[in-house]
Amino acid sequence: MSQATAPKYDLVLKGGRVIDERNGRDGRFDVAIARGKIAAIALSIDADGARVRDVTGYIVSPGLIDIHTHVYHKATSLSVDPGLVARRSAITTLIDAGSAGAGNFDGFRDYVMAHSAYRILAFLNISFPGIFGFDKDVQLGEATARSMLPVHHCVAKIEANPDRIIGVKVRIGGLVTGDFGLGALELALEAANAVGLPLMTHIGHPPPS
C-alpha cells in the first residue's frame, strides 16, 4: 500500500467507556491510535481502513499508576515480578515503597528498573539495607537502631538518582522499630526535608501508640 493510501490510524477502539481525568472525559468515545500514540478521541471515528476493536462494556483509560508496590524482585522476600503485576492490572508506572535502602538501591536500579518495560520509581528506605527480613516466619526490624538509619547515606543516594527516587520511606511500629520507636520517623523526616521530597510512612502495630 502506498504512503498516500495508507490508513490514517493503526487501530481504532470503538464503544468503550473512556475515563480520562486529566482532560475531564468520562463517557462513551472512540479512541484512535497511530504509531503507538493516541491520535484522536471522539464520539465516533471513521476507521478508514484501520484495524478496529470493539471494546463495548470495557473501560479505556490512560495507564494506571500504583503508588505502593514492592518490586525488588528476587532480591527481597516480599517483592513480586513488576511485569506480571503491571500487565494484568493496566499499570504503566509502579512506585516501590521502600524495598531498597541506600545500601542496595544500585542493584534495584541496575537489575530491575533498567530491565523493566514499565516505569519504576521508588521511595528510598531510610534504613540502609531496606526491608530485608520480612516473611511470614521471619520478622527482623530494619529500623530498630539509629546505626541502621544513616541520614547522610540516604540523602546522598537520593541526590545521585533524581530520575528514579521520588521520596523517603520508613516503617514504624512493633518489631520494625522496637524500642527505637518514633526515632526512626524523625530520622526519615530529616532526610526527606534535606532533599525536599515527600515522606511515606507505614504505621504498624504499637509501640509507639
Image (tube, rainbow, N blue to C red):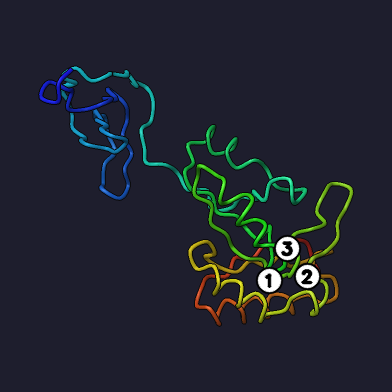
Q: Are marks 1 and 3 in contact (CB under 8 Å)?
A: no
**Amino acid type, residue under disc 2 in the picture:** Ala
Local packing at callout 3 (Cα closer than 10 Å; few below 14, some 14-19, many 20+) is many
- In the image, 192: left or right of 119? right
Name the image quarter holding the N terminus: top left
Q: x, y (%) of residue 123?
A: 59, 63
The number of callouts visible is 3
Mark linked to residue 130: 3
Name the image quarter holding the C terminus: bottom right
Mark linked to residue 126: 1
Mark linked to residue 191: none
**Amino acid type, residue under disc 1 in the picture:** Ile
Residue closer to the observer: 180 or 112: 112
Residue closer to the observer: 174 or 158: 158
Of the numbered discs 2 and 3, the one sitting upstream in the chain is 3
Residue closer to the observer: 188 or 114: 114
**Amino acid type, residue under disc 3 in the picture:** Gly
Q: x, y (%) of residue 162?
A: 50, 68
Q: x, y (%) of residue 176?
A: 80, 65
Quick check: 184 above or below 132? below
Quick check: 156 above or below 40? below
Q: Are marks 2 and 3 in contact (CB under 8 Å)?
A: no
Of the numbered discs 2 and 1, the one sitting upstream in the chain is 1
Q: x, y (%) of residue 24?
A: 26, 46
Mark 1 lies on a secondary structure that is loop
- The residue at which mark 2 appears reads as 143
Mark 3 lies on a secondary structure that is loop
Choose mark 2 or mark 3, whichever is in front.
Answer: 3
Residue at the extreme right of the image, as rendered: 137
Q: Do the residues labelled 2 and 1 touch (CB within 8 Å)?
A: yes
Q: Which residue is drawn at 67% across and 51% down?
A: 72
